């Protein structure tokens, strides 16, 4: 049946409304959401890692993070995806390590993660802006814009980034429905739990740590826990001589 | 003129079918990679670039080397290159096409490749490199094709093409400089973080490019009845000689800085490159071959007798090409990643699928060269009557 002009106009009109209304509704919903958001805010998010408090063989922070973010467990080093994980002290702090540091200290595990640099080389080299720095300092990944060129993996001086060498979804242990999964071919890394901060929660790794070895907060706020810790203790940062201004501070 | 590529001798047909078969093989393996992901390659989270980007880096040099013909002919009116300048431009077209394809197959999300233009990021060297490479491709297509069309008509090239040719000279330098800047601008990779990277790239390019062109000219003389002329070939051989000497000099300069200053991080990479680390010496073995080829090529090119003899010249050109293909290819690339930022020696071995795709892209490049050179030779023969 060929529709008459009148029928055609009605159908076209309804279709247009169908397209416009939900987006308007979504827009209003997102506005009211952000207005009422109980989210945590900061001038500059940062983390302090008191690695001396870490128990040997403890995996609490890695497990909590990887579960919260649907990080796949591929099961081989070549295609491994990781956001926060342990490395030996002498690997993490090459230049600071020397033969007179007792063996037990040199081989002690230190948790490492994205440093959320103030001057991030990964952001500089990204050809599409898929990785970017928020005003509060969190270095973010837009999985939908990432073309998987891997230049950020080469640019990151900390080895903090991973790429999905294949579809990661079959390798996710227990799916967290509140956080997106990724597709093959895109890069991912620690996001300082921005999705939890937005809902008013501290990062998953910080809450998971029974020893309180991870301290997170606004480094620009003199009253914040992380700032007070930095004011009191001597801290170092990974490869700070490169000028990347990393925002993960280590107490050793 | 394109129709000239469709007819040819039996040998031409066999060669084209041979290349098409390898290209088809590459396409087959690429479709598998597209389905599965980059896990089918030997790349890992630590050595995150491999064979593909190594070929890309090397081929940008081949593309840029067209300038060693264009510059003497158009700026210095060096007549001996008049006949073959188009060959250099056509080689550049094929090389840039291969570069683009190698970048493409390296992407984890290839369907989003145009995001590079849509979300243009001026701080990204990769963005600028893709931009200049595309312009360079267009410049060479326009100038090469227009000049060949005027050869066919027996007329001098139109005046408007001259500015484009002049522009292509600095542009050739820019493509390889920006490719070097991709590497030389990364704070955490001390092996690449050196200001001599761009000069090294250019000198290696001006040795490997002419070496390849000489080989093509010798092949065409033997099989296609086109003689580039003794003077042109010898002039290219001299350019390759000086460029090779410069390239080796630059590597030695780098070695001196690294091993005299004795900064551990810098030395580790060079130790890996030439001797291997923790029992991983595959790259070092390839580099030994590269060094042997460089020395052999240098001796044969420096000696006037062997340079003037076309057989030994061909051997020298193969040696130079192989040497620089290794050095500026996987040698440069893998060593940048090993040891990793965490001091680990991570192995990289290209997989069969990865090699097949790379061979497919080389076959595609050779096919483009074959077709363009065939058109060139047919046009010249027609014009000669």
Image (cartoon, helix red, strand yellow):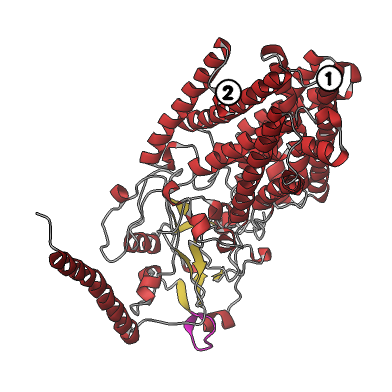
Label 2 with label 1: CB-CB less than 8 Å:
no
A37 sits to left or right of A160: left
On the question of residue B244 being in view, the answer is yes
Q: Main secondary structure of the magenta part?
A: loop
Q: Quadrant of residue A97?
A: bottom right
- Please state the horizontal and vertical placement of residue B282, each as a whole percent of the image: 61, 31
Give the vertical position of B279 relative to A139 (above or below). above
- Identify the residue at horizontal 58%, vertical 38% (top origin): B97
Classify mark 1: helix, strand or loop.
helix
- Identify the residue at horizontal 43%, vertical 45% (top origin): A79
- Please state the horizontal and vertical placement of residue B34, each as a whole percent of the image: 40, 40
State the residue position of label 2. Answer: B4
* Residue B274 vs residue B95, the one in the foreground: B95
Classify mark 2: helix, strand or loop.
helix
Q: Which residue reaches farthest top?
A: B10
B112 sits to left or right of B177: left
* Residue A72 vs residue B230, the one in the foreground: B230
Give the vertical position of A40 relative to B140 (above or below). below
Give the vertical position of A212 relative to B10 (above or below). below
Task: Check disc 1: other Cα within 10 Å, few if <14, some if 14-19, many if 20+.
Answer: few
Numbered label tally: 2
- Please state the horizontal and vertical placement of residue B115, each as a whole percent of the image: 48, 56
Q: Quarter of the image for the C terminus of chain B: give it.
A: top right
The magenta segment is A218-226
Q: Chain of mark 2?
A: B
Question: Is B276 colored magenta in this rendering?
Answer: no
On the question of residue B331 being in view, the answer is no
Q: CA distance from mark 2 to mark 1?
A: 27 Å
State the residue position of label 1. Answer: B230
* Residue B355 vs residue B217, the one in the foreground: B217
Q: Quarter of the image for the N terminus of chain B: give it.
A: top right
């Amino acid at each position: 049946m060929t529709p008459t002009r009148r029928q055609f106009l009605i159908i076209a009109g309804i279709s247009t409304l169908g397209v416009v209304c939900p987006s308007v509704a979504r827009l209003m919903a997102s506005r009211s959401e952000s207005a009422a958001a109980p989210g945590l805010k900061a001038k500059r998010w940062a983390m302090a890692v008191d690695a001396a408090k870490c128990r040997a063989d403890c995996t609490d922070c890695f497990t909590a993070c990887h579960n919260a973010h649907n990080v796949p467990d591929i099961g081989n080093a070549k295609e491994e995806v990781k956001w926060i994980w342990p490395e030996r002290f002498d690997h993490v702090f090459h230049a600071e390590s020397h033969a007179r540091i007792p063996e037990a200290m040199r081989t002690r595990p230190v948790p490492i993660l994205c440093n959320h640099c103030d001057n991030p080389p990964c952001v500089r080299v990204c050809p599409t802006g898929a990785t970017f720095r928020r005003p509060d300092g969190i270095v973010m990944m837009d999985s939908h814009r990432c073309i998987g060129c891997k230049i950020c993996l080469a640019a990151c001086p900390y080895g903090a980034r991973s790429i999905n060498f294949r579809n990661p979804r079959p390798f996710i242990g227990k799916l967290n429905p509140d956080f997106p999964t990724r597709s093959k071919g895109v890069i991912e890394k620690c996001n300082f739990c921005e999705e939890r901060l937005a809902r008013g929660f501290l990062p998953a790794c910080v809450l998971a740590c029974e020893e309180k070895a991870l301290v997170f907060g606004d480094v620009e706020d003199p009253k914040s826990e992380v700032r007070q810790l930095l004011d009191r203790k001597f801290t170092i940062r990974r490869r700070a001589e490169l000028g990347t201004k990393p925002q993960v501070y280590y107490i050793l | 003129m394109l129709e000239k590529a469709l007819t040819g001798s039996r040998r031409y047909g066999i060669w084209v079918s041979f290349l098409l078969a390898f290209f088809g093989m590459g396409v087959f393996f690429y479709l598998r990679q597209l389905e599965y992901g980059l896990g089918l390659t030997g790349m890992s989270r630590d050595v995150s670039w491999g064979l593909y980007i190594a070929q890309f880096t090397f081929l940008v040099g081949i593309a840029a080397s067209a300038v060693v013909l264009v510059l003497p002919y158009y700026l210095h009116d060096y007549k001996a290159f008049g006949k073959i300048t188009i060959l250099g431009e056509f080689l550049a077209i094929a090389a840039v096409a291969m570069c683009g394809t190698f970048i493409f197959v390296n992407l984890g999300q290839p369907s989003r490749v145009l995001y590079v233009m849509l979300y243009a990021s001026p701080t990204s060297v990769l963005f600028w490199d893709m931009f200049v490479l595309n312009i360079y491709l267009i410049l060479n297509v326009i100038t090469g094709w227009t000049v060949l069309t005027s050869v066919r008509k027996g007329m001098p090239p139109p005046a408007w093409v001259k500015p484009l040719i002049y522009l292509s000279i600095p542009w050739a330098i820019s493509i390889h400089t920006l490719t070097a800047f991709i590497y030389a601008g990364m704070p955490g990779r001390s092996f690449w973080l050196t200001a001599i990277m761009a000069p090294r790239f250019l000198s290696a390019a001006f040795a490997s490019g002419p070496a390849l062109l000489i080989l093509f000219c010798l092949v065409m003389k033997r099989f296609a009845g086109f003689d580039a002329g003794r003077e042109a070939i010898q002039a290219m051989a001299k350019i390759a000689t000086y460029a090779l000497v410069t390239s080796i000099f630059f590597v030695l300069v780098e070695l001196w800085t690294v091993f005299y200053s004795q900064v551990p991080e810098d030395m580790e990479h060079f130790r890996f490159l030439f001797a291997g680390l923790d029992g991983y010496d595959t790259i070092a073995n390839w580099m030994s071959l590269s060094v042997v080829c460089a020395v052999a090529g240098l001796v044969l090119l420096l000696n006037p007798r062997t340079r003037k003899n076309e057989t030994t010249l061909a051997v020298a050109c193969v040696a130079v090409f192989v040497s620089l293909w290794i050095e500026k290819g996987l040698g440069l690339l893998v060593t940048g990643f090993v040891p990793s930022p965490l001091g680990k020696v991570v192995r990289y071995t290209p997989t069969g699928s990865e090699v097949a795709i790379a061979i497919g892209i080389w076959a595609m490049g050779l096919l483009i060269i074959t077709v363009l050179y065939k058109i060139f030779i047919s046009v010249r023969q027609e014009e000669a009557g």
